[in-house]
């Protein structure tokens, strides 16, 4: 199995960073896990596909058509926002790009489940969570942590 | 139905505050919702029962015997940490006492679901979440927000 | 804590039986757990309240106003149909009245979690699950099983 | 995205049938979704991989090492048995091979979510659910239903 990295976050102003994160992860041979919907989630998946990668979308609902077009494998949960726990758990590491309340829950779950997590600047302020200046630094950090 | 307030958090050093929050909520006629286990969860329930209140515990597992002895009504979820979403959603308001990663997820869910939430000092630092100097201030804040 | 019994099922033609199950459970000192919505769920709760009992509703969504008016304590899950697992797990025993696909999932979960479960005639046909001719027989069966 | 078919069930005596179901699905270009653990789940995944297919495992826990060795993409849920809802929902169609209480819940969820579902003989008896004499008949039935 390939290393899986979850990309979390939201915010239209963060899609370029998310796309770069997705692209870099794919170039490093990682599968990209995300929430399967729009904005940051779509951008991360689009970046991964542009680099020939593989994407997994964990959706809140039960309708496959809600997945963005860059999702290869879809998991339909019917769990609403509680699916955030699964997005965090299913990554060997987690990278946050932008984000709001939902991202906060995913960062918390990543910590609970012991997944290395990093926040790409500029992003949420969460005590004790490391930050990366660039998408490349974030990918480097997470992959170094996962390989330990 | 009574107003339900969820008390979240953790940390042995916070149990006195949690117990006071539980007691004050019961005196104000609210039911106390919590995660049903120990420390802050047990203290909040104990405080509520000492004041003649009612308590609801939403547990991560499926064994009723894991509930602390001050829980009146138990919901067994088999959801592990994903049950945190339910603890936040099931309160008309949410009060955080101490806490760590799990509390962070619950604060995030409270915001997602539009529940008023307040952090009792000293507690987690979460951008945009109001803080209360004392248990009484926290209870006042949440009940004022709920009644709106 | 009182013994909790979950009443599951659906179908307008079964509400009288469900209401009697709720009433009998309350008379025997049990709290009634249900899915918190209409038809069989509402009837079981109404029966329990008519007999002075206590009711717990475990809802699929996050809006408290969706609970039927006979629910005392509400748990909001945001889990959609996956909340059926919680309805089954949260009963010390489970009684099925009428029902369809959702009830099938709850009967399956009751078996997984080792909860005694009985189907009130007429109801679903599920291999290996005992049946009761009347609400009274069902309540007798479940309470005898729980007390073992 | 490829068509995804969930293979559910349990029982050591059913692994040959499950493996054939997995193999046939892969030959028809479908991804195989399963619960990611042993017996029928492992056999379905093994069959799919033997035919060059792709597999997705939706696990009850949070430890990736619990997935069987034929899983390509793993979703870790922390949901215990409630993850059964996701296994059913994530298939465009569902095939049951053998099985017990958990399979019953998955069949119920498949019906709730409107997924075509078929039981391979010999298997559970569930009112209203079609049966197939062989793995090939089951795959034919589900793919014909999905393509409608």
Image (spheres, coloured by chain):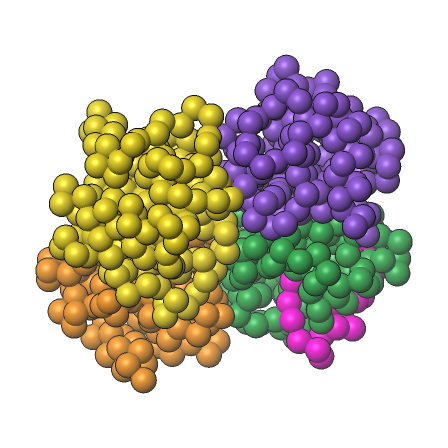
Chain colours: A orange, B green, C purple, D yellow
Is A23 left or right of A89, judged from the image as shown? left
Residue A46 in percent (x, y) is at 17, 54
Q: Is residue B20 magenta?
A: yes
Kindly identify the residue that appears in the image at 45 percent across and 57 percent down: D60
D124 lies above or below B26 = above
D32 lies above or below D145 = below
Q: Which quarter of the rendered picture does the C terminus of chain A lie within?
A: bottom left
Asked whether residue A43 appears in the rendered view, the answer is no
The one nearer the camera, A73 or B3, is A73
Is D29 left or right of A7, judged from the image as shown? left
Residue B75 in percent (x, y) is at 67, 50
Kindly identify the residue that appears in the image at 38 percent across and 59 percent down: D37
Kindly identify the residue that appears in the image at 63 percent across and 49 percent down: C114
B123 lies above or below B44 = below
Region in magenta: B6-27
Q: Which quarter of the rendered picture does the N terminus of chain A lie within?
A: bottom left
């Amino acid at each position: 199995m390939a290393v899986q990295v979850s990309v979390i976050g939201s915010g239209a102003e963060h899609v370029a960073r998310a796309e770069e994160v997705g692209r870099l992860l794919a170039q490093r041979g990682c599968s990209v896990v995300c929430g399967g919907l729009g904005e940051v989630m779509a951008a991360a998946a689009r970046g991964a596909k542009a680099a020939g990668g593989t994407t997994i979308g964990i959706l809140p609902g039960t309708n496959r058509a809600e997945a963005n077009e860059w999702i290869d494998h879809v998991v339909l949960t019917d769990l609403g926002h509680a699916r955030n726990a699964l997005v965090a758990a299913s990554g060997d590491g987690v990278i946050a790009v932008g984000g709001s309340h939902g991202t906060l829950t995913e960062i918390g779950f990543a910590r609970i489940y012991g997944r290395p997590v990093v926040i790409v600047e500029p992003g949420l302020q969460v005590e004790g969570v490391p930050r990366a200046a660039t998408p490349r630094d974030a990918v480097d950090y997470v992959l170094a942590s996962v390989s330990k």
